[in-house]
Image: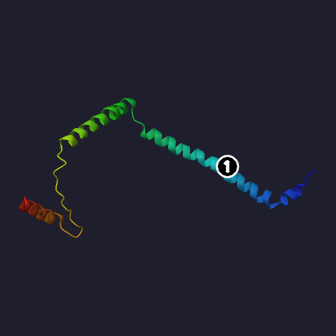
């Protein structure tokens, strides 16, 4: 047979195996705690099924169609590029100057 005293003196068996067991065991233990966290988040975010069906299906298709109609009606060929105010400029005063310049050009 093998000598138990030699095994006890071996540093790999004495320090390495317990360390490996702690790392692997800790990984499985933490997995359970994180799973509880994610399960709780799913429960909090869950909506009533009837409410969820109303919100998702009808609203998304209606909004997309409305936005498409608005874009079709908008005149995208005639627009004016107006520079926005810089952080150190007064925005209302600058906007008034821009509007007066645009009116003079027209």
What is the x, y in percent for residue 53?
A: 36, 31
Name the residue rendered at 21%, 41% in the picture: 72
Q: Quadrant of residue 52?
A: top left
Residue that sits furthest to the top in the current view: 50
**Above or below, 8 relative to 55:** below
Split into 4 quadrants, where in the image is the C terminus?
bottom left
2 lies left or right of 89:
right
Residue that sits furthest to the bottom in the current view: 88
Name the residue rendered at 35%, 32% in the picture: 51
45 lies left or right of 6:
left
Other residues around mark 1 within 10 Å, as few (<14) / some (14–19) / many (≥20): few
Identify the element where label 1 is drawn.
Answer: helix
Name the residue rendered at 63%, 47% in the picture: 29
- Mark 1, residue position: 25
- In front of the other: 12 or 86: 86
Count of numbered circles on the image: 1
What is the x, y in percent for residue 96?
A: 11, 63
What is the x, y in percent for residue 82?
A: 18, 60
81 lies left or right of 15:
left
- In front of the other: 103 or 53: 103
Residue that sits furthest to the right in the current view: 1
What is the x, y in percent for residue 17?
A: 75, 54
- In front of the other: 57 or 9: 57
**Coloured how?**
rainbow
Q: Quadrant of residue 48?
A: top left
């Amino acid at each position: 047979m093998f000598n138990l005293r030699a095994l006890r003196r071996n540093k790999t068996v004495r320090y390495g195996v317990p360390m490996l067991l702690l790392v692997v065991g800790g990984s499985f233990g933490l997995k359970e705690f994180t799973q509880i966290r994610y399960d709780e988040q799913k429960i909090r975010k869950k909506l009533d099924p009837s409410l969820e069906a109303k919100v998702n299906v009808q609203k998304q298709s209606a909004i997309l169609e409305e936005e498409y109609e608005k874009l079709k009606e908008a005149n995208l060929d005639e627009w004016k590029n107006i520079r926005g105010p810089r952080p150190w400029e007064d925005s209302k005063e600058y906007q008034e100057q821009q509007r007066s310049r645009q009116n003079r050009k027209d």
